[in-house]
Image (tube, helix red, strand yellow):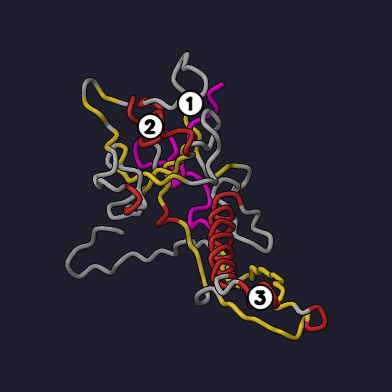
């Protein structure tokens, strides 16, 4: 943009637009159940449906984290452009004890986060890391606030750290390894889906074996909307929607 006088013409520009193509990719699950089992256990189909729903959700989250981008999502921990990884790794604290996560790690990560007001920002943690959270303070002030509900299972979040909600996820690395804690701006990850998970059954596929066939499928794909870490207007430390701390060993 340019300043202009009252009757001056505006100055034109031709911004470069990053092109990204996403096409839906299928994820499927298949199971065979004997007709006798179905007759004797009316809950079998419900159990299967819940199990496959859970597994599809797990695979989706895992692909968003570390998918290859070939026939599946491109994970933010894998994505790179011109040899530069999208996810930034901040340095550990000098002489930091192995297999720990301390307040200096968290504040360093926060300073490298690329985000705007209103973005969906969350801490993604391996459950191994939860024992570190109550130990984190600035002076005498705690920076971790546990869940407010008496029954924590009613909330998907494990409290907050430095004001941002915490999610415990299986996809995070074990404590002390880069990726055990990720500060993620999920607003910068594009995920496309076509409807909800579909479920179908057929008695014909395994008819001579007295088995019912159950099939589940869903179509989705994803890719981060930022190609590589960005250099801010002031300062030289790059920023990314996805930040972690280097391995502490």
- The location of residue 198, given as percent across then percent down, is 56, 77
Residue 105 visible in this rendered orientation of the protein: yes
> SS for tag 1?
loop
Q: Going by the picture, which residue comes out furthest to the bottom?
A: 204
> SS for tag 3?
strand
Can you tell which quarter of the image residue 1 is in? Answer: bottom left
Q: Label 3: how many residues lie within 10 Å, few (<14), some (14-19) or many (20+)?
A: some
- The location of residue 29, given as percent across then percent down, is 66, 68
Q: Pick whichever of labels 2 and 1 is earlier in the sequence.
A: 1
Q: Depth check: 240 or 233 in front? A: 240
- The residue at 69%/70% (across/down) is 30
Query: Which numbered marker is on residue 106?
Result: 2
| Mark 2 or mark 1, whichever is nearer to me | 2
Magenta range is: 223-249
Q: Depth check: 232 or 27 in front? A: 27
State left or right for residue 54 relative to residue 208: left
Q: Depth check: 127 or 220 in front? A: 127
Label 1 to label 3, Cα distance in Å? 49 Å
Q: Going by the picture, which residue comes out furthest to the front?
A: 40
């Amino acid at each position: 943009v340019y300043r202009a006088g009252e009757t001056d013409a505006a100055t034109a520009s031709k911004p470069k637009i990053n092109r990204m193509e996403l096409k839906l990719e299928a994820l499927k699950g298949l199971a065979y159940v004997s007709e006798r089992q179905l007759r004797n256990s009316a809950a079998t189909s419900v159990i299967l449906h819940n199990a496959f729903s859970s597994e599809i959700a797990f695979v989706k989250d895992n692909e968003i984290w570390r998918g290859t981008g070939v026939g599946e999502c491109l994970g933010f921990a894998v994505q790179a452009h011109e040899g530069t990884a999208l996810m930034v790794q901040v340095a550990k604290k000098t002489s930091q004890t192995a297999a720990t996560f301390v307040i200096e790690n968290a504040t360093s990560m926060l300073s490298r986060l690329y985000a705007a007001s209103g973005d969906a920002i969350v801490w993604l943690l391996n459950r191994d890391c939860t024992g570190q959270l109550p130990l984190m303070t600035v002076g005498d002030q705690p920076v971790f606030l546990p869940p407010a509900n008496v029954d924590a299972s009613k909330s998907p979040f494990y409290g907050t750290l430095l004001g941002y909600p915490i999610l415990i996820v299986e996809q995070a690395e074990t404590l002390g390894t880069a990726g055990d804690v990720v500060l993620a701006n999920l607003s910068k990850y594009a995920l496309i889906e076509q409807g909800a998970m579909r479920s179908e059954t057929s008695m014909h596929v395994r008819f001579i074996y007295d088995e019912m066939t159950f099939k589940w499928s869903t179509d989705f794909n994803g890719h981060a909307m930022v190609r590589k870490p960005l250099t801010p207007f002031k300062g030289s430390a790059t920023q990314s929607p996805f930040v972690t701390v280097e391995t502490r060993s």
